[in-house]
Image (tube, rainbow, N blue to C red):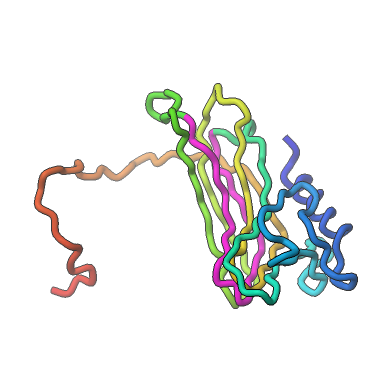
Amino acid sequence: MKHWKAVIAACLIGFAMNASFADGIKLGAPDGWQLWGPLGDKYEMGIDPAESTPDHPALIIASKNTPTNETVTLMQQVNATEWEGGMIEFSMMAKAVGAEKNRVWLRHLKGRNPVTGEKRSVPELMLNSRSIPDGKGWERITIISYLPKDSGDEDRHFDIGISLASKGKIWVRDIKLERKPFVPISNPVELPAFRMGLPTQPARNLNFNG
């Protein structure tokens, strides 16, 4: 597996070579990424030199003047072979201005029952995501997900992506994708057994008043 720095660097080099705000925003997905949604119609994308650093070009995704709630997504699929059995940490520096609906996300399929090892007839979709806080400037956004071993399944992969579904602008730079060791809980909390047949009530006293 290529080291994540090499993979991400290649993508960002593609950004820098293909886009310049001085010449207008270069439309289309940068090298190594896939584009989904109405880019060019509702949104535009490119490298913003004012928000870039010498080592980390900053990608901007911005809505055009026409109001929209359609989603534009930049994503890629990563081969999961060398990530199984560990924690995936997907992070980036990001900021948003006037972007009410945006997400940074990581997803994968869980094809087997972790207890029995049997293959599920319908794989379970595992999705972890976060929003880029609006108007707070640059900050590190981090998503962590455990990728269980699903030996025997072909074409195992996970997806990483950035989405905008409203007016506004988002910027991302310095993307990192790292494999962290999985550390099981050594002393899990024992929960009470799930009980059926008892009378139910609306939720109450959630503020501990008396």
Q: Which residues are magenta?
A: 85-111
Task: Reply yes or no: does residue 103 show up in magenta.
Answer: yes
Residue 86, above or below 202: above
Q: Quadrant of residue 124?
A: top left
Q: Quadrant of the C terminus?
A: bottom left
Q: Position of residue 100 (x, y in %)?
A: 55, 72
Q: Is residue 65 left or right of residue 14?
A: left
Give the main secondary structure, helix, strand or loop, of the magenta stretch. Answer: strand
- Residue 40 location (% of width, % of height): 75, 64
Q: Along the horizontal axis of the image, is 1 left or right of 95?
A: right
What is the quadrant of residue 25 in the picture? bottom right
The question of residue 167 being in magenta is answered with: no
Which residue is drawn at the image coordinates 48% and 44% (left, top)?
126
Residue 91 spot, x, y in % from top left: 62, 55
Residue 156 vertical position relative to residue 44 in the rendered view, above or below: above
Residue drawn 67% across the image and 53% down it: 36
Residue at image coords 75%, 50%: 8
Q: Is residue 144 above or below residue 170?
A: above
Image point (60%, 63%), residue name? 70
